[in-house]
Amino acid sequence: MSSTANGSVTMTLDGSNKSFSLPLRPGTIGPSVADVSKLYGNLGIFTYDPGYGMTASCESKITYIDGDEGVLLHRGYPIDQLAEQSTFLEVAYLLLNGDLPTTAERDEFEHGVMRHTMLHEQLRRFYDGFRRDAHPMAVLCGVVGALSAFYHDSLDINDPEVRRISAFRLIAKLPTIAAWAYKYSIGQPFMYPRNDLGYAENFLYMMNAVPAEPYHVSPVLARAMDRIFILHADHEQNASTSTVRLAGSTGANPFACIAAGIASLWGPAHGGANEAVLKMLGEIGHKDNIPGFIEKVKNKDSHVRLMGFGHRVYKNYDPRAKIMERTCHEVLAEMGIKDDPLLDLAMELERIALHDDYFISKKLYPNVDFYSGIILKAMGFPTSMFTVLFAVARTVGWISQWKEMIEDPSQRIGRPRQVYTGPVRRDFVPLDARG
């Protein structure tokens, strides 16, 4: 394959006279892509890309990542500016609509979301069908999927107003569904949402309040929760987002698509990394044990991994990690935790890893999960809820990507190809002749 000056890439099939020019499609920023959509028709071959790591499956205006430079932009805005200066619902409006809202647009959007926080009362009884020790991600997946049985007016995906209301419902109801999953697991009464509270405030209220006494939501913790939601709102075409788009390409309703995304996120290689960081720190135990642990990580035969470092996309410092580190200190100060062994251990591990030639050469830098687990643990969340919080935040990204896909006339039903390596054609052998 050779690049040409006229904006195309020429592919020549060895042993034949066939060649084909693949047009290059540029993005506004980032590398151009070679359009292979007509490759089979011209050369009779497909491309092979396990995990789609080098394949653009769609065109999107929502999120841009430059992993080499450590850049994350939502609709052009840097993630650090959004996390420090914006709110989660403002970022949600941005992801869904393309621009930051005016004051009037923000107020209307927040009112629209916060008036959909309640669940149908029959869904309250739906929880009784789960075991008390069910993983909250299993509950989340089941209840979100069941929403399509309650909102028949939200199933016409070709109606823009239906898509708008579906977005409101999903963004608004996920915190309620998640908080009730937690309350159910510990045997406490469900707390109904309070629309006089902000998005993150309301979630913390439903998680922690009980009917027997008043509960005050700390502004510091609410802001930290809001920032965590912002940092996890969207992250381009990752596994769960691609799952939502693939399910949506069939014409499935938005509730089913988001439930599919939740199921994909549940995988430990995707949404469970911050829980793995806490487990790793617990196994290290003390700062004195870090050098020995580092040596095990370097030894390929030990199968010990440095969790919370490195990323499939980022080959530089994850821009979300620095914000998460500052948030971690704010939360620990608010909680009155002056000397946290886990944080001390994490900071020392980070310091050693960032100055070690082995990790530098492999471009292993802290990612967003490195500190988020410590924050959530300090705020009282059990580790089983970590991925649930991820799903609450990522729902706005999923629904934005789903909406963009539905409105893109070039999108078709997803249908990846394969390289078949099974038996060639053979004839059926009767049972008594098979030996």
Image: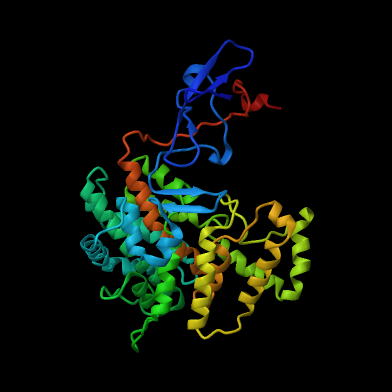
Please identify the residue farthest to the top as the structure is shown: 17
- The relative height of residue 297 versus residue 51 in the rendered view (above or below) is below
Q: In the rendered picture of this protein, how many numbered marks are placed on residues?
A: 0
Residue at 49% x, 74% y is: 381
Tell me residue 235's x, y (percent).
46, 52
Residue at 61% x, 21% y is: 426
Residue at 31% x, 66% y is: 123
Please identify the residue farthest to the front as the structure is shown: 5
Tell me residue 343's x, y (percent).
61, 75
Say which of 355 and 212 sits in front: 355
Tell me residue 118's x, y (percent).
27, 68
* Quadrant assignment for the C terminus: top right
Please identify the residue farthest to the bottom as the structure is shown: 213
* Quadrant assignment for the N terminus: top right
Horizontal relation, residue 49 to residue 349: left or right: left
Horizontal relation, residue 225 to residue 157: left or right: right
Say which of 266 and 234 sits in front: 234
